[in-house]
Image: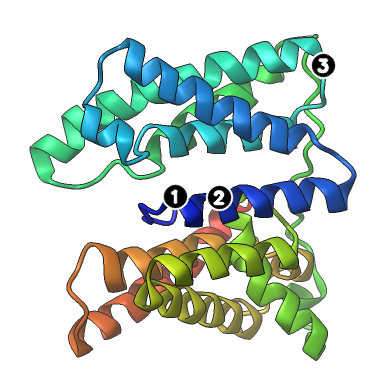
Amino acid sequence: MFFMENALTGGLFLAAIAYASYAGGNWVTLVGAIVGVCVATLTARLLECDEDSITSGLFGFNGILVGVAIPTFISASPQLWFYVVVGAAMSTVVTAALSAMITKSWGIPASTGPFVLTGWLLVAGAYTFGALDVSGDSPKLVSDYISGAERIPSHLELVQIFFRNIGQVYLLGNEISGAIILLGILIASRVAGIAAVLGSLVAMATAIALRAEPHSVVQGLYGFSAVLTAMAVGVVFLKPSPRVVVYALLATIVTVFLQGPMMC
């Protein structure tokens, strides 16, 4: 998920999901994560996908995202788990398809594209099924920031925003979970950890400076994509250099800009 091929780091990520589930008093996201990663990985093996990619976790991380996202937006029910299993399996098929089309043709990794495509379709489709209750809230555009009544977040809120920006990559609006995830990133790569830190700080500063919707900012919803952008552009796919740092900074800020219309 964070471009980290490290088992201990992955264990900490799962611990972060478990803590958020515990803190929220709702264990379905943890169960969904486990089911998602297991089903996606098993599907990849049954379909005899590339073994190195399976071992590296490139099929499982989209599955775990589907497993976390669907229970986040859809209320728990027997039908929900059928939805999660099918969705996780489908994410593997979409991952293989996008990898064949995009990665092999243009050298661009599919990354979380399979999750985004599969997740959006599943949640949208759930509105048409009476057995599935879509309970997720959509962000509101009207706010004190937008209307001009500026409110500067407190120091505690700034700390919460910083870590929630990282936690929301796994749809976890919990600052402790975000801190655990950051620890996992630093264990795997200090440079990537620094990129995640800077990505979160830049996203937070940009969103506040532009008076983005306060609740969404505090929950880390303007920062999670920017954190991944900072890591991907600044460290993972390009060799770090002063020019790459500037390029990653630009990409991170633009990601916040693009996040705005996605919140509608």
Is 248 or 44 nearer to us in this picture?
44
Q: Which residue is mark 1?
A: 7
The quadrant in which residue 87 appears is top right
Q: Amino acid at mark 2?
A: Gly
Question: Can you tell which mark lies on residue 212?
Answer: none
Image disc number at residue 77: 3
Q: Find residue 227 and report its horizontal and vertical position in percent.
A: 48, 67
Q: Would residue 150 be seen by someone viewing this image from the given angle? A: no
Residue at horizontal 79 percent and vertical 43 percent from the top: 137
Disc 2: which residue: 11
CB within 8 Å, label 1 to label 2: yes
Dot 3 surroundings within 10 Å: few (below 14), some, or many (20 or more)?
few
**Measuring 79% from the left and 45% from the top, which residue is drawn there?**
21
Q: Secondary structure at mark 2?
A: helix
Residue 213 in picture, x, y percent from top left: 72, 68
Question: Sequence-wise, which precedes: disc 2 or disc 3?
Answer: 2
Q: Secondary structure at mark 1?
A: helix
Tell me if I can see residue 44 in this picture: yes
Alpha carbons under labels 1 and 2: distance apart: 6 Å
Q: Which three-letter amino acid code belongs to the residue tagged 3?
A: Ser
| Structural crowding at the residue carrying mark 1, measured as other residues with C-alpha within 10 Å and reported as few (<14), some (14–19) or many (≥20) | few
State the residue lying farthest toward the left: 105
Q: How is the image coloured?
A: rainbow
Q: Secondary structure at mark 3?
A: loop
| Left or right, 34 with reference to 218 | left
> Which residue is at a point 63% across and 60% down the rendered structure image?
167
Q: Is residue 106 placed above or below 13 in the rendered structure?
A: above
Q: Is residue 210 left or right of residue 232?
A: right
The kind of residue on which mark 1 rests is Ala
Tell which of 31 and 119 is nearer to you: 31
**Mark 3 and mark 1: span between their CA atoms?**
31 Å
